[in-house]
Amino acid sequence: MSNNDEQASEPSQRKALLKIRHRIDRIDQEILALLKERLGCAKEIGRLKSKDDMPKWDPKRERQIFERLHKSNAGLFPEQSLDSIFQEIITTCRLSQKKIEVAYLGPEATFSNLAAVEYFGHSARYRPMETIEDVFIETERERVHYGIVPVENSIEGAVTSTLDSFMKYNVKICGELNLDIRHHLVNQSGDINDIKKVVSHSQPLAQCRQWLKKNLPEIKTQTVFSTGQASMMAAEDPTLAAIASSMAVKTYHLHTVVKGIEDYSGNATRFLLIGLKSPNRSGYDKTSLLVGMLDRPGALHKSLSILADHDINLTRIESRPLKGEAGKYLFFLDMEGHMEDDNIMKGCKQLKRSCSSYVWLGSYPRSKT
């Protein structure tokens, strides 16, 4: 192609590009108009539900929406992005009916904060707490609508402070979220040579132990109560580096020294949403119990046999010592299904008769991942 031909084609290309951009602008306006219409519908639903004192959150309806969207999409639009976009839309519309306050382990930019935003989007009000127990207290006393707490990590196991709080406070599990965890080494300068100490929560430090040993063998570490606090400390002291989330970089104006320093891939943390009332059946649910066993041989085996006899799939069991009573334990049980399901209801009713203590912690929609 000659130079003259190339010059002649440039106005044509610009014209085609401009035409496509105008089309995108029209599409954006149509999307905005439909979003405003959807918001209006959500507010009307909220008014109708308020008249009949109906719950604002219908997990079964939300699951049906995502199933329909996936079917219509047929894999054309990336499904993870599709879920993220519509989760934000659905949550924003739901929150237009009633503004929701959510407590989490703070300060800002902790993984708990990240999980809360992932669950509720950016339209909710978020309140950082100093400890996981404070999240339970605020929720039980109805100073917030919900709390979100970590319960287990795929590498480090159970978060014992969360399990212990379930033994002390009268709350219900309302939902769950599995959050992929990526740990980043961050500081003020982005230069690894400026680091004299690494600070973070105990679990991230444990999950990055081998990387730190290999790459920063002479550098001391310090445990603090959250990755958010570690980020705040690094923002104030140029000799400190924090192990923190990607959110922390923006929130505290830090720089990334090294991305993804976790020792193992597939690192994920399960978070639980807590409130005062569990949601209705969605059709894809979990039920959680806190039970104590009778002091006799084979008590645990008998209890698990009851669940098996009712075709109940137990997905998790975790024991915690009963405070002040040496040798006695409480067991946290997670199972597939909702308390409204016939087999769950009958199985749990029989289980209750064979236990020294029994607490239904809630039935709630299972995480999509």
Image (tube, grey):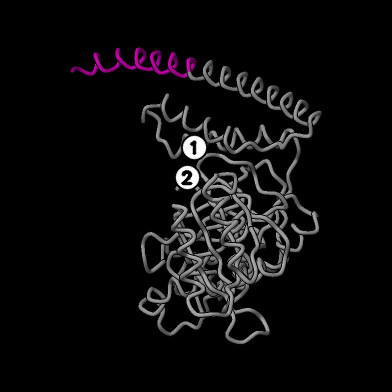
Residue 101 place in picture, x, y as percent: 74, 48
> The residue under label 2 is which amino acid type?
Lys
Residue 331's spot in the image, x, y percent?
56, 70
Image quadrant where residue 250 sits? bottom right
What is the CA distance from the residue labelled 2 to the residue labelled 1?
A: 10 Å
Magenta run includes residue 22: yes
The residue wearing badge 2 is 368
Q: The disc labelled 1 sits on which kind of residue?
A: Asp
Tell me if I can see residue 347 in this picture.
yes
In the rendered view, tell whether residue 321 sits above or below residue 21.
below
Label 2 with label 1: CB-CB less than 8 Å: yes
Q: Which residues are magenta?
A: 1-23
Pointer 1 local density, CA inside 10 Å: few below 14, some 14–19, many at least 20: some
Find the residue positioned furthest to the left.
Answer: 1
Q: Residue at x 51, y 48 (%)?
A: 343
Q: Is residue 343 above or below residue 98?
A: below
Horizontal and vertical percent position of residue 23: 48, 15
Q: Which circle, 2 or 1, is nearer the viewer?
A: 2
**Residue appearing at x 76%, y 25% in the figure:** 48
Along the line of sight, which residue is nearer the eye, 261 or 334? 334
Main SS, magenta region, reads helix
Residue at numbered disc 1: 83
Q: Which residue: 60% across, 48% down?
A: 117
